[in-house]
Amino acid sequence: MEIVIKPGRRRSDLREIWANRELFYFLAWRDFKVRYKQTLIGAAWAIFQPLLLMVVFTLFFNKVAGISSPSGHYPIFAYTGLLFWNFFGGAMQAASNSLVGNQAVVTKVYFPRLIAPLSATLVTVVDFLCASSVYVALMVYYRVIPGMLGVLLVVPMLLITWLAGAGLGTWLAALNVKYRDVRQILPFFIQALMFVTPVIYALAFVPDRFREFVYLNPMAGVITAMRAELIHQGSVAWSGVAISAAISVLLFAFGVLYFERAEAGIADII
Amino acid sequence: MTPTIEVRNLSKAYTIGHDIVSYRALRDELSTVLKHPVRSLRGRMRETEQLWALRDLSFDVQEGDVLGVIGRNGSGKSTLLKILSRIVAPTEGSAVLRGKVASLLEVGTGFHAELTGRENVYLNGALLGLSRRQIDARFDEIVAFSEVERFMDTAVKFYSSGMYVRLAFAVAAHLNPDVLIVDEVLAVGDAAFQRKSLAKMSAVATEGRTVLFVSHNPDSVLALCKRGIHLSGGRLICEGSAFEALESYREELDKFEEATVKRPDGAAPGAVITQVRVQNESGSAPRLFQANEQIVFEFDAQVEREYLDRSLVAGFGIDTEAGMRVFTAVSTWAGAEISTADGRVTVRCDVPSPRLVSGRYFVSASLSTADEMLDHARAAITFEIAPSGLLLDPPRDSSHGPIDLDFRFEQVIAPDRQEVGGQVR
């Protein structure tokens, strides 16, 4: 084994990342363990948070503001959106804080830095799985039988969501090292972005002249496709979903490339 | 033979000035653009300055060598370590490391207060490059070495600091890499654990591993290292045996003594202490003093006009190498009156029998009025007390405290035992 240390940009070495694959697991495991320490109900929070949000959204947007789902029940409609949106937003936020949050480690030990933001998103996957149990319960309660195509599409849609969230999060992680403003503004940004994404309303709600731009937002494609195929609410344009998928891949590539360029200087300025 | 570590023209520059802040808020960047639109459009601000933390460093470490890296603070030791550990990238030059490398810049990297001892062993091990299977295999050894078996399932936030560092060092001690890069992690725990750590380190060193050991402590460098390099101001001053490197380091410290005292600009408003001297009775200035030999401290100072003919207070302080204050002498305590009519002052302080144990000490000098510090020359000069108790058992040195007081020992025999015949069981 030979390690060559030279100035300048470090290329991410997939073999090196693979050799450190256990670190993905250990860092994610630590994040998960630590997150619910000293809480009363522990990991049940991962279920309660989206559940409460669904209740609040149903009360305010559905009952008070009168936003309705295209067909069927609003709670399960909103929950479909929230489930995937929370995965996206959670992955982005966890990844963006991963370097700054691990400052003590980053300045004292070397590991392929890309592992930090990517492993941070693993905890969000666990959150997604917890929150999915509520989703299944809602399906049983409202007697919704998920469509076959929808079930098959869950994993690809998750992948699109992950690529977009992890890609943006990786970019923001590097940016956060230089500008701590990222951490301050990101929660607002995610919130605002949620309202321009069909999470609590249907895609049909969007005025026609904006309709073709909506799919540039990867989450619009994911959520609309899942609603149409999994719980039979609304319809989806597959060309739009393809655009969403392509954008996700681009976001991920951009995030990783930006991160690589910044990587060599991270420990100097963090 | 191909060297295990090959360092070639390694340099590291830090940009100071505008970028010295560790992070920048967007606001700073924006206000820079608003204040200096033209300059910032052209690119970087011109007011930055490059500081070379490491300059043109080249050396080799052969397989199985234990290399000590010594130098004063700011000499580039830590930067070298961080580059070889791949934490920061060099600005110029290159380095090649052959074999499995483990670097320890601190013990307990990544330890999380909320996790248990067991969990932290796994997390820390993984961060230091061990696989889960390797940790499994070494787990019992690590726990035994740490002496905290009973608390492995307790969160480390409930550990005493001693338990914490013992566990942390135990993980580090069981890495078994080909190349080990260490930064003074020896200085952890109580004296007994330090001895154990040192023994473990020298065991590692004799197992044929290549070790790069960075330290301020000449004793541990001499104990562990065969070879040494001495850095100063980011440059390589001496490369040779550990002893040669230490000699070179001492020389640098001595030169530092002879040189007139230097301080940042504007630090001394009322006076400047120009020279601090340490002498013996006869007025010569040896490097080394016998135990309890008389020591004479002197300093020369130049006092500003506004303080002429005013009563001044002079002080000397003695610190250990570790920075602990051992003794302070103030002129007013001894009832001495000091003042100057022409601005020049020389103050002398006589210590007839300094009760110091062997080791190196730093002397600081200060000059003030009753209510205003005029100048303070910190650690301006060093002197050394020769070892006198190394042949005792256990050997007596500065690790047992810097002060040599008179003492007597006798066995106290309790009256009721005396009746049994005066024997102690």
Image (spheres, helix red, strand yellow):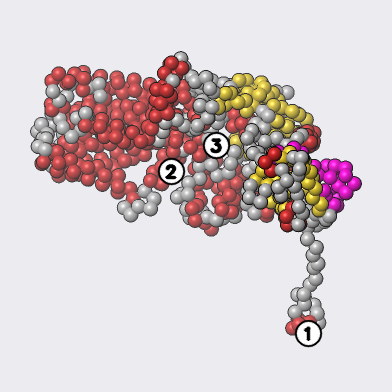
* Foreground residue among B65 and B112: B112
Number of marks in picture: 3
Q: Residue furthest bottom?
A: B419
Q: Is residue A216 above or below residue B316?
A: above
Residue B213 is covered by the magenta coloring: no
Q: Which residues are magenta?
A: B271-297
Q: CA distance from mark 2 to mark 1?
A: 65 Å
Residue B281 is covered by the magenta coloring: yes
Percent coordinates x, y for residue A70 in the rendering: 10, 31
User: What residue appears at the point 65 percent right and 31 percent down from the top-left corner?
Assistant: B76
Percent coordinates x, y for residue A252 in the rendering: 36, 24
When asked about the image quadrant of residue A83, the answer is top left
Q: Secondary structure at mark 2?
A: helix
Q: CA distance from mark 3 to mark 2?
A: 18 Å
Q: Which residue is mark 2?
A: A30
In this rendering, position of residue B102 left or right of residue A30: right
Answer whether labels 2 and 1 touch (C-beta < 8 Å).
no
Amino acid bearing label 2: Arg
User: What residue appears at the point 26 percent right and 44 percent down from the top-left corner?
Assistant: A49
Percent coordinates x, y for residue A250 in the rendering: 34, 20
User: What residue appears at the point 45 percent right and 50 percent down from the top-left corner?
Assistant: B114
The label nearer to you, 3 versus 2, is 3
Q: Which residue is mark 3?
A: A108
Answer whether labels 3 and 2 touch (C-beta < 8 Å).
no
